[in-house]
């Protein structure tokens, strides 16, 4: 099937947005309609994208990584009843639901960041996304994801930097720990 909006075109459009402004809020608002359009296309979808690591609870398929790590696009799969614990991204993020519903919970850090490896989080908001719905996050915003359905879910993720080059963290809420977070993509 011929795509109306191939990933390559989407990448060029997002890179142009990033060339025009460094204002993160403006970048996010410009990327959202483009990401919704790209996520709705069928040409990039493959059955293998539903495969996830049962130990982690999710899987990540790379669609694009800019050579200078300035743009990173993945499709994530979420196993039934699983997800990812609170984490930040170290860059801006735009996520579009490909299937759903995918529950996102947003968290606020309430400690003073003075102790290395220690963090206390407080839950502030929930947003559940289904097909075509968007969640966006500024640098440093923290969220967790859970799939409360019985099906494996997919979502389309766009980040302003390669996630393994931002020094980002995940958070163990029970033990108030802040831990480095890297992912493997296929
Ligand atoms: Fe995330």
Image (cartoon, grey):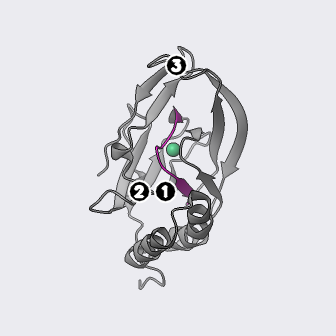
Q: Return the residue found at the far right.
A: 125
**Mark with earlier residue (1, 2):** 2
Residue 146 visible, this angle:
no
Res 86 quadrant in image: top right
**Mark with earlier residue (2, 3):** 2
Q: Position of residue 9 (x, y in %)?
A: 42, 79
Residue 144 is left or right of residue 184, and the answer is right
Q: Quick one: SS at disc 3?
A: loop
The residue that label 2 is drawn on is 74
Q: Position of residue 142 (x, y in %)?
A: 58, 38
> Is the Cβ of the residue at disc 2 closer than 8 Å to that at disc 3?
no
Res 53 quadrant in image: top left
Q: Residue at x 54, y 68 (%)?
A: 35
Q: Nearer the viewer, residue 72 or 129?
A: 72
The residue that label 3 is drawn on is 114
The magenta stretch is: 86-97
Q: Above or below — where is 171 with respect to 161?
A: above
**Mark with earlier residue (3, 1):** 3
The residue that label 1 is drawn on is 157
Q: Above or below — where is 123 with respect to 100?
A: above
Which of discs 3 and 1 lies nearer the camera? The answer is 3
Within 8 Å: ligand 1 and the Cβ of disc 3?
no
Q: Residue at x 70, y 46 (%)?
A: 127
Q: Quick one: SS at disc 1?
A: strand
Other residues around mark 2 within 10 Å, as few (<14) / some (14–19) / many (≥20): many
Q: Position of residue 8 (x, y in %)?
A: 37, 76
Within 8 Å: ligand 1 and the Cβ of disc 1?
yes
Other residues around mark 3 within 10 Å, as few (<14) / some (14–19) / many (≥20): few
């Amino acid at each position: 099937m011929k795509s109306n909006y191939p990933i390559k075109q989407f990448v060029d459009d997002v890179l142009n947005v990033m060339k025009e402004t460094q204002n993160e809020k403006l970048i996010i608002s410009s990327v959202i309609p483009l990401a919704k359009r790209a996520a709705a296309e069928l040409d990039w979808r493959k059955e293998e994208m539903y495969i996830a690591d049962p130990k982690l609870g999710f899987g990540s398929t790379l669609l694009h990584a800019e050579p200078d790590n300035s743009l990173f696009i993945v499709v994530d799969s979420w196993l039934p009843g699983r997800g990812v614990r609170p984490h930040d991204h170290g860059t801006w993020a735009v996520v579009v639901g490909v299937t759903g519903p995918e529950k996102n919970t947003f968290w606020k850090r309430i400690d003073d960041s003075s102790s290395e490896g220690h963090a206390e989080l407080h839950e502030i908001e929930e947003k559940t996304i289904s097909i075509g719905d968007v969640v966006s996050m500024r640098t440093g915003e923290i969220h967790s994801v859970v799939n409360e359905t019985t099906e494996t879910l997919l979502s389309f993720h766009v980040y302003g930097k390669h996630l393994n080059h931002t020094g980002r963290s995940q958070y163990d809420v029970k033990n108030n720990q802040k831990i480095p977070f890297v992912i493997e993509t296929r």
